[in-house]
Image (cartoon, rainbow, N blue to C red):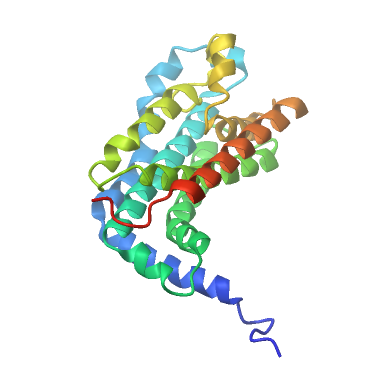
Amino acid sequence: MSGTTPHTPAPSVRRLRALARAELALLGRNRGVVLTALVVPLALPFSVRPALDQLDLHKLGISVGTAMLTAAIGFSFLFAVYTSLVNAYVARREELVLKRLRTGELTDTEILAGTALPAVALGLAQALVLGVGCAVLLDAGAPRAPYLTLLGLVAGLVLSAALAALTASVTRTVESGQVTALPLVFVSMTGSGIAFPTEAMPKRLASVCELLPLSPAIRLVRAGWTGGASAYEVLGALATALAWTVVAVFAVRRWFRWEPRR
């Protein structure tokens, strides 16, 4: 007979759940990471409001509420998931936690996924809260194509976690993680439509910026709210997001470091 029943989770699910609970406990002890993950995505969108007020958003078919919503969700990708996971992966590696986990039943994929689950769940919860808050307080309204917003959230969360693992592989210490994570944070803020919409950029520059890692997720989230994306644009965004995810996962499997970098 099988070792599981319809009411008993599979062994891999139980292992992931246990690792995620342990990681959540460790995350809660790091006040600096928690503060960055919780407060920054909520506070930074207000810093881009002056720049948004100088743009003719109505001409672009975007409201201030929608622009600030996508900015907030983008900051959540970057700070609640990406930078916090870079710190988590590096810290667990340098403390030999990852090495010890590999000697047990957990597979490499389960170790990386279980470590990422609390941050990903936090990013998803923030996105939902921000969506409701912006819809009510900033008159962003309800999403016209919610399935596109959902696709954007999934793409952004998964890719942020994969890129965090990749960045951790070239990061020596938790302190240096603030430096190694900075390029993606800066490029995404300025070029992926987080700080201001790519629709406001010159077309040639916008076409290049659409190929950045988090650009497809931001475009899908915004398109879900505005309902202004064609099937061609949606398929293009999905293809770009999938390509980046495949490249990031391959790179992590090839170059992720499980031993301390000393």
Q: Residue furthest right?
A: 231
Residue drawn at x 70%, y 31% is 234
Where residue 137 appears, as percent x and y from the top left, is 48, 36
Where residue 117 appears, as percent x and y from the top left, is 47, 58
Can residue 138 be spotted in the picture?
Answer: no
Where residue 247 appears, as percent x and y from the top left, is 56, 39
Which of 207 and 65 lies nearest the eye of the viewer?
A: 207
- Assign the N terminus to one quadrant of the image: bottom right
Whether residue 86 sits left or right of residue 109 in the image: it is: left
* Residue 187 sits in quarter: top left
Query: Where is 41 relative to 7, above or below?
Result: above
Residue drawn at x 42%, y 36% is 75
Q: Residue furthest bottom?
A: 1
Query: Where is 31 relative to 12, above or below?
Result: above
Badge count: 0
Where residue 55 appears, as percent x and y from the top left, is 48, 12
* Residue 63 sits in quarter: top right
Residue drawn at x 31%, y 43% is 171
Whether residue 222 sits left or right of residue 44 in the image: it is: right
Can residue 121 be spotted in the picture?
Answer: yes
Which of 237 and 193 lies nearest the eye of the viewer?
A: 237
* Residue 97 sits in quarter: bottom left
